[in-house]
Image (tube, rainbow, N blue to C red):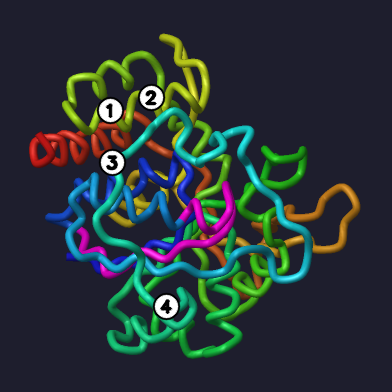
Amino acid sequence: MKKVLIDCDPGIDDALALALAAGSADSLDLVGVTTVGGNVDLELTTANAVALREFLQMGDVPVTPGSAGALLHRTVRATAVHGDTGLGDVVLPTPERGPSEGHAVDFIIETLKAAPGEITLVAVGPLSNLALAVRREPRVVEWARDLVIMGGSYTRGNHNPAAEFNMLADPEAAAIVFEAGWTVTMLGLDVTLKAMVDGGVLDRMRPLGRLADLLVPAAQFYGVVTAEGGPAIHDACAVAYVLDPTLFTCVPAVVNVETAGQYTRGMTVTDFRVSGREANALVATAVDVPAFWDLVIGAYQKLATRLG
């Protein structure tokens, strides 16, 4: 069993990443979910995470809210992509329980401290919570077994030509995280945009009972699905990497986050020329798409059986 703590901003793709984790309960021990303002405001990301915990039957996994916005600069949101609530057209039942007391930063620090070397951090939103945790307690870098993020790119952006959304939403936080002294495994747009929900994938989701009520409208809200292609469910790639790293080709690199550029703010400047230097990242450059979807759909099928 791999222990994971997921830091997220649900968000359509966050929801599908949490569903992947929930459907992989035989392989993943989810010790907690922390939320951050990102795709939508913190109040909504937290409400979505709590509703997803109940809908996906994730048990008593704590959901702890964290940072509402970027460390230094104005808030950036993605409601145009995820809808006003963050979950597109999906409406989940009202949950019976709310989030945990406390702050995500404290939860991250205390959880890693209690099990040093055992827990992989999976961050699929802006890195504000992780940056604050590193600043408050630098030993989290040693206590974490690994850090896997969905974010960045070495080729292009999506929120603007240079920057991926999670990095642009809080570049200063991202810079702190990449400079903290651990190796960041970066699943960026270079691979996530290859893992598209095409017509064949959507057809494999449709028979999944109650779970399909989340998966299908979420995927279709994200973009037009055709036989040849469709939207990418970016965040699920980070969870898939933890489940099976062999799905991805990762290359050592030095990654710096641009915080001052007029046109390139939030860009993950990636240098694969690491000879004689210490890499601070493993950057995903390729993904086995059919195997990825076999893994994801297989987990969803297990979860669908449980949900009915």
| Number of numbered tags placed on the structure image | 4
Specify whether 233 is left or right of 169: left
The residue located at (28%, 44%) in the rendering is 19
Label 3 close to label 1 by CB (< 8 Å): no
The amino acid type, in three-letter code, at marker 4 is: Ile
The amino acid type, in three-letter code, at marker 1 is: Asp
- Residue 300's x, y, as percent? 21, 37
What label does residue 108 carry, if any?
4
**Of 54 and 98, the residue lying toward us:** 98
What label does residue 217 carry, if any?
2
Specify whether 239 is left or right of 159: left
Label 1 close to label 2 by CB (< 8 Å): yes
User: In the rendered structure, which disc, 3 or 2, sits on the residue that comes first in sequence?
Assistant: 3
User: In the rendered structure, which disc, 3 or 1, sits on the residue that comes first in sequence?
Assistant: 3
The answer to whether residue 251 is seen in the rendering is no
- State the CA–CA distance, disc 3 to disc 4: 28 Å
The amino acid type, in three-letter code, at marker 2 is: Pro
What label does residue 213 carry, if any?
1
What label does residue 93 carry, if any?
3
Q: Is residue 150 above or below residue 98?
A: above
| Disc 4 element | helix
- State the CA–CA distance, disc 3 to disc 2: 15 Å
Q: Which image quadrant is residue 211 in?
A: top left
Q: Which image quadrant is residue 196 in?
A: top left
| Disc 3 element | loop
The answer to whether residue 153 is seen in the rendering is yes
